[in-house]
Image: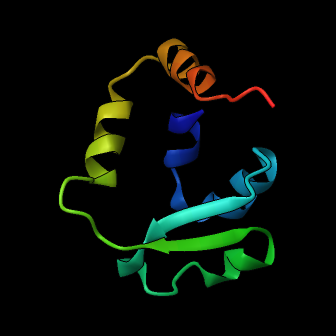
Amino acid sequence: MWQECANNWKQEVDDIKKYKIDEFAIGYDWGGELDNLSKICEVRSLPRTKYFSSTKIKNLLYGIPTTHLNQIKYAFIIDT
């Protein structure tokens, strides 16, 4: 799923609808560039942190086979 979503940042709206996303978090340095998404979900702007890099995480995820990504995804599903 991640690789499918991350290949084209212009498809945010379609991905939000497809995966039923209710919150979209992005770094504050994007400065309102994705405000249009607030029509379909809550957009949260997060401050930069010293030890967290979404770019590093994306680069790591690109090297993980899709089957393993699915295992990671299901590990974060919380039973309600």
**Quarter of the rendering occupied by the C terminus:** top right
Answer above or below: position of 53 versus 79: below
Q: Quadrant of residue 75?
A: top right
The residue depicted at 61 percent of the width and 62 percent of the height is: 24
Q: Is residue 25 left or right of residue 47?
A: right
The image shows residue 56 at horizontal and vertical percentages of 25, 46
The color scheme shown is rainbow
The image shows residue 52 at horizontal and vertical percentages of 26, 53
Name of the residue lying farthest toward the bottom: 32
**Quarter of the rendering occupied by the N terminus:** top right
Answer above or below: position of 48 versus 61: below
Answer above or below: position of 2 versus 33: above
The image shows residue 71 at horizontal and vertical percentages of 55, 15
Query: Which one is nearer the viewer's eye here, 46 or 61?
Result: 46
Q: Quadrant of residue 67?
A: top right
Answer above or below: position of 18 versus 11: above
